Image (cartoon, rainbow, N blue to C red):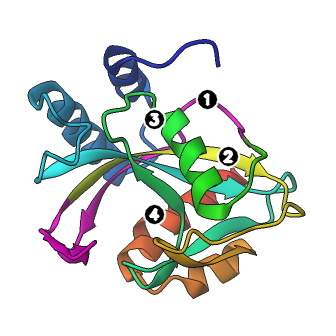
Amino acid sequence: MSHKMSRQELMEQIANYIPYNEQEERDQNLILNWIEEQENAFSRENKMAHMTASAWVVNPERNKVLMVYHNIYDSWSWLGGHADGETDLLTVALREVKEEAGISKVRPVSEDIFSLESLTVDGHVKKGTYVSSHLHLNVTYLLEADPEETLSVKADENSGVAWFSPEEALARSTEPWFVKRVYTKLIEKMKA
């Protein structure tokens, strides 16, 4: 990647993205409007909603998905994290995978957006402070990693890292909305 993606370039990328279904169509508009209207859309300082990046990490054969056991959500889930001011969300997704799974070799299958979501986050305690319920306006990228590479947990965020078949990934997640609306969609898109 030659240069960091600016806010304007990211907005263009989101605007040009062709939604996969009605959920993505609605969320695409929501995300674009939020970035336009909110100066701090990329910061957690925005308590209502802020930008995040997620990674759907697959092996080269596309028959395994990397998941982490997320402490806050108490479920196996995909990898990702807060933009924290960064507008190059692919960079955020790559960094989060390296941090959360302890791997060094991960690459984008494509630099294009893989999916878009508006995700609800229930109120929770983080580092001793209550965080009110809010939205994660999320851009997902399809990344590839080597399942042979040694994994390690990031203890302050997760308590497990593992490769699953797509079917196992759906079975292991205990978040019904994610399974129905997000992971099932990502698996369908991956197979397409």
Report the residue marked by disc 3. 89
Q: Is residue 176 magenta?
A: no
Q: Are marks 2 and 4 in contact (CB under 8 Å)?
A: no
Q: Where is mark 1, residue-wise?
A: 111
Please report the residue visible at 68 percent of the width from the left and 82 percent of the height from the top: 168
Secondary-structure class at tag 2? strand
Q: Earlier in the sequence, mark 3 or mark 2?
A: 3
Q: Quadrant of the N terminus?
A: top right
Report, in whole angstroms, how far the alpha carbon at label 2 lies from the one at label 4.
16 Å
Q: For numbered disc 4, what is the local secondary structure?
A: helix
Label 3 and label 4: CA atoms lie apart by 18 Å
Residue kind at label 3, given as amino acid type? Leu
| Residue at 83%, 66% in the rendered image | 150
Q: In the rendered image of this protein, does residue 188 appear above or below residue 192?
A: below
Image spot of residue 56 (x, y percent): 60, 55
The residue that mark 4 highlights is 182
Q: Is residue 130 magenta?
A: yes
User: Percent x, y for residue 154?
Assistant: 57, 68
Relative depth, front residue between 62 and 105: 105
Q: Are marks 1 and 2 in contact (CB under 8 Å)?
A: no
Say few, some or many: other residues with alpha carbon within 10 Å of mark 3 (under 14 / 14 to 19 / 20 or more).
many
**Crowd class of label 2 (few under 14; some 14 to 19; many from 20; radius 10 Å):** many
Q: Would residue 179 be found to the left or right of residue 22 on screen?
A: right
Which comes sooner in the sequence, label 3 or label 1? 3
Q: Nearer the viewer, residue 26 or 173?
A: 173
Relative to residue 6, is residue 148 depicted above or below? below
